Image: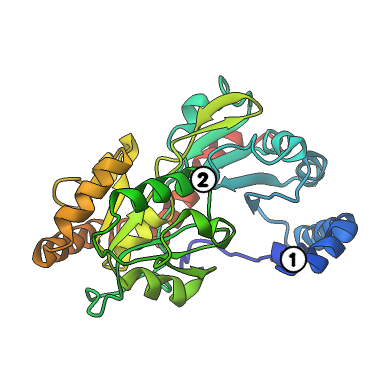
Amino acid sequence: MRYSKVELDEVAEEAFAPRPRARWLRAVNRILHLAYRQELYRQILIRAEALKPDVVMMYKGFPIEASFVCQLQKMGCHVVNVYPDFSPHAHGAVHKKAIGAYDLVISTKSFHPELWRSVYGYNNSCVFVPQGYDPAIHLVRDLPTAPRFDVVLVATWRPEYGGLMKALGKLLAGRGISVGIGGNGWMAHREDFPSDWVFAGELQGRAYIEWLRGGRICLAPVTREVVINGTRQPGDEDTTRTYELAAAHCFFIHHRTGYARILYDESAEVPMFDTPEELAEEILYFLPRIDERNRIALAAHRRAVPAYSLDRRAEEVVSAIEVFLEHNSGNK
């Protein structure tokens, strides 16, 4: 943690809730998940009892149950969740209930605070702090110099992303445009895409950034609306890519959303699109215009660095917690 105002201790969730790729290990995990959860709880309680923290903070907290949040609160801890997903209803009833038990939810979604009660049905406090890029991983000071692909995307496959790229493949067919896609899930749908597209699988850390910087044009799609249990809810307006691509000096085209247009000037910093047809037009326009792409990428980088860094977001998170504690100091 690079924020000196905070003394931080950590219990790494992945040490107690591993996420292996091998199918047989996932089967073992399903058998042992209750034991994993109880061990995670035990370690958190040991730290909380020893340190007497002002705040216990969870990041999403998927394994955490509402009853455990209440147990921490009975110990005198304020319990805060930093929530990164578009809907807390999308991960099952246990998780949905748990999110309502936290004292404060700090959401990375701009629309959550306004809809927290009416759409999601919660009575606890919710404030908005955006996502950001990690300077230790995503910040690159120079423009890319050796692109391998014309168009690149790194994202876990979703039906919306698959549909977008399938349509794009048809719109760009026969134009000799090279495409590279990274992320989980794409190979299961390989037959939907042109045979010359390259799929890299999961990419993390520097490999993720180098793949993105290997494209003349990067794509930043979002899922703008979702259906959960038959009910339409807002989807994403931004993702971590929204900030990471700019920090890495990538030229990128972003799905047009209200919040993205607040973050960037789409005429000078980040071009945007609504439909596959508009995206194809943008790609065909910008591919031969390297100087214009570089100028726009530089402008987006200046906008994002350092304003959209996780260091700045950490300051905002701490400020939100301080305001909450000031107004709720007598409630524990």
Q: Amino acid at mark 1?
A: Pro
Q: Give the numbered dot on residue 189.
A: none
Instruction: Decide: is 186 above or below 121.
Output: below
Give the mark nearer the N terminus: 2 vs 1: 1
Q: Work out how far the residue at label 2 is from the one at label 1, CA to CA, in angstroms.
A: 33 Å
Name the residue: 22% across, 73% down: 143
Q: Is residue 239 left or right of residue 94?
A: left
Instruction: Decide: is 232 above or below 328.
Output: above
Instruction: Decide: is 134 above or below 93.
Output: below
The colour style of the image is rainbow
Q: Dividing the image into 4 quarters, which one contains the C terminus?
A: top right
Disc tally is: 2
Q: Is residue 91 left or right of residue 298?
A: right
* Residue labelled with disc 1: 18
Residue 108 appears at what percent x and percent y? 48, 44
Taking the image as drawn, is residue 4 in sight?
A: yes
Find out whether the residues at labels 2 and 1 contact each other: C-beta distance under 8 Å: no
Name the residue: 43% across, 50% down: 239
Residue 224 appears at what percent x and percent y? 43, 36
Between 253 and 101, the residue placed more toward the observer is 253
Q: Quadrant of residue 228?
A: top right
Q: Amino acid at mark 2?
A: Glu
Between 61 and 87, the residue placed more toward the observer is 87
Q: The residue tagged with tag 1: helix, strand or loop?
A: loop
Neighbourhood count class around disc 1 (C-alpha, 10 Å): few under 14, some 14–19, many 20 upward: few
Q: The residue tagged with tag 2: helix, strand or loop?
A: helix
* Residue labelled with disc 2: 322
